[in-house]
Structures are given as C-alpha cells and as structure tokens.
C-alpha cells in the first residue's frame, strides 16, 4: 500500500513512498499512479497483466478503455499524468477493481490506452 493512502495507520508491512516504480521479485512491478486517490497504485505482473484498481477499466458499450472521472477522489490532472506514465509499459490484460476486464495484444492495448489518455486530456 502507498504511504499517501494511509499505509502506516493500517499496519501495512510493505509501504511504498513517492512515485518511483518498484519491483517486487522478478515478476511484479508496483507503479504509483496518483489520481483516483493520492496514493493509488497499479500492479503490472510479468509485463502482461495490469491490475488497475479503480484507475482504469474496459467499457463494453464504448469498446474502449476508460477512466472514471465521477469517482476521482484526489485529482483528475494527476490521474491523467499517471495514465501518460503507463504508456511506457506494455500489457495484454486490464484487470480492474471495478468495471470490466479486457485482453488484447500489447500493441492494441497500448493504442486503447493512448486513446483513453487523449480523451482524459479533453475532460476538465
């Protein structure tokens, strides 16, 4: 858990601070992505599975990746910046805490994420 989301008061053993990515073992990358909350993080497993929490999900009706503006508890500009940071990663699956999962090729998922970022930039 990230320190900015109160890890210390919850007795969490592995506390993340700052915005630097961290590795946990050989297979897991912890990526701080402030926005939804101040200390939001996503987890990238084996450069294939992106566990996004409440940060990003698939919309079956829109057939695209979406961010949830109406449940952004910290900062939409920060969440947009965090999404831009995710563009340097490749993954094939989005596994959200809320919303639908989705899988596609790494190239297609990158294109979906890029379109999501552009949409976020247009939303105040």
Image: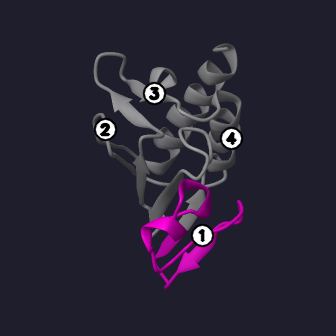
The magenta region covers 1-29
Q: Nearer the viewer, residue 91 or 17?
A: 17
Q: Earlier in the sequence, mark 2 or mark 3?
A: 3
| Residue on which disc 2 sits | 98
Q: Secondary structure at mark 3?
A: helix
- Badge 3 vs badge 4, beta-carbon distance below 8 Å: no
Question: Magenta segment: does it hold 103?
Answer: no
The 10 Å Cα crowd at callout 1, few under 14, some 14 to 19, many 20 or more, is many
Q: Which mark is residue 84?
A: 4
The alpha-carbon separation of the residues under discs 4 and 2 comes to 21 Å
Coordinates of residue 104 in the picture (x, y in percent): 37, 44
The 10 Å Cα crowd at callout 2, few under 14, some 14 to 19, many 20 or more, is some
Residue 121 against residue 81 in the figure, above or below: above
Residue 44 against residue 58 in the figure, above or below: below
Q: Earlier in the sequence, mark 4 or mark 1?
A: 1
Q: Which mark is residue 71?
A: 3
Give the position of the C terminus as an image quadrant: top right
The alpha-carbon separation of the residues under discs 2 and 3 comes to 11 Å
Mark in the foreground, 3 or 4: 3
Residue 101 against residue 19 in the figure, above or below: above
Q: Earlier in the sequence, mark 3 or mark 4?
A: 3
Q: Secondary structure at mark 2?
A: loop
Q: Secondary structure at mark 4?
A: helix
Q: Residue at x 55, y 43 (%)?
A: 37
Q: Can the viewer see residue 107 in this picture?
A: yes
| Residue on which disc 1 sits | 16
Q: Which mark is residue 97?
A: none
Residue 86 against residue 43 in the figure, above or below: above
Q: Nearer the viewer, residue 37 or 92?
A: 37
The alpha-carbon separation of the residues under discs 4 and 1 comes to 20 Å
Q: Earlier in the sequence, mark 4 or mark 2?
A: 4
């Amino acid at each position: 858990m990230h320190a900015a989301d109160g890890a210390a008061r919850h007795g969490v053993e592995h506390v993340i601070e700052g915005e630097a990515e961290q590795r946990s073992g050989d297979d897991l990358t912890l990526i701080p992505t402030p926005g939804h909350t101040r200390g939001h993080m996503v987890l990238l497993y084996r450069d294939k599975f992106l566990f996004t929490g409440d940060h990003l999900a698939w919309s079956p009706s829109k057939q695209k990746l979406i961010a949830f503006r109406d449940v952004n508890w910290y900062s939409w500009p920060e969440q947009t910046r965090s999404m831009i940071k995710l563009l340097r990663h490749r993954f094939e699956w989005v596994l959200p805490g809320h919303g639908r999962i989705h899988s596609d090729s790494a190239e297609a998922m990158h294109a979906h994420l890029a379109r999501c970022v552009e949409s976020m930039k247009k939303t105040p």
